[in-house]
Image: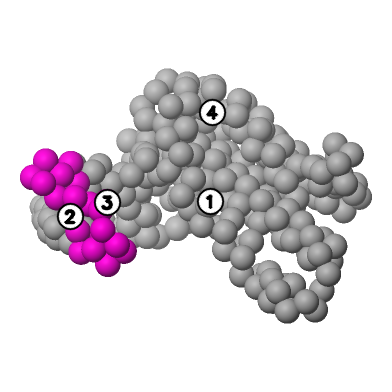
Amino acid sequence: MSFFDGLKFRTIQSPIHVLDPRAKFLYVCAIFFSAILFDKLLPLTILFLISIPIVIFGQVKREWLRSMRGALFFAIIIFVTNLIFPSISTYIQFINGDIVFSQFFKIFYVSVNLAVAITFRFVVLVESFSIFFLTTSPDHLGLALEKIRIPHEFIFAFTTAVRFVPVLAEEAQTIIDAQKSRGLEVEKGNFIKKVRNYIPILIPLIVNAIRRSLELAEAMESRAWGSMKNRTNLFELKMKRNDFIMIGIALGIVVTAIYVRSIIPIPTLIELFGLA
């Protein structure tokens, strides 16, 4: 459940927390766009390192590390999938003797580089979105969405999901611990046995989620939610100097990424260290 800790906002007074959500979202979009442009490990590593100072200034190192550790399982799946499935025909040809070892090694080398790059692209995206949700209040995020004229019904559904996904993850972990204390062995057995072991966990989790949704609906109805079209807010978002600096950094990342992708040839790490 540590992966979902990267979606839980932490109330901390830091230079990153006080930034406007729109500026931080532009930064996330810049990292996302730049990561999509590259399919080699070197530029993706640089994009990963760019966000490290933001993690430090945002004072969310522990939570960020937990979200990275939680994403490791998905990263392994992405790596194995991109390494095996595109190269199945190559493996068959090598076994049948249709290609020699040198040809197989070159194709396998390209597949490994591509699989590593795609996996690290996923890590970079998880890193940027984890920073955004760790340092952005759902209330301020809703205000930012209202500023760009998104209907309030969609905003409420989105911010509610952002709030309750980490809550459900914590509740699932609590149920798992409670069932383990009663003798339930979740991790033992084959795949089918493990799926069956999770049924006593999913049923109370679903029941509690339905109960919580009903309570939320009753609370909304008692407060006449949706009766007024022109809503008012306690807080107002205003762009400040640091927000414009963040926007400038985001634009700089995009421009640099486009320039590097178009003009500069990017070596692989093996070519960079002269091992090729």
Amino acid at the residue labelled 4:
Val
Q: Earlier in the sequence, mark 4 or mark 2?
A: 4
Q: Earlier in the sequence, mark 3 or mark 2?
A: 3
- Marks 1 and 2 sit apart, C-alpha to C-alpha, by 25 Å
Q: Measured from the top left, where is residue 219 in percent x and y? A: 13, 51
Q: Which residues are magenta?
A: 176-197
Amino acid at the residue labelled 1:
Ala
Residue indicated by mark 4: 55
Measuring 31% from the left and 49% from the top, which residue is drawn there?
165
Amino acid at the residue labelled 3:
Glu
CB of mark 1 within 8 Å of CB of mark 4? no
- Marks 4 and 2 sit apart, C-alpha to C-alpha, by 34 Å
Residue indicated by mark 2: 201
- Return the residue nearer the eye: 17 or 205: 205
Amino acid at the residue labelled 2:
Ile
Measuring 14% from the left and 50% from the top, which residue is drawn there?
184
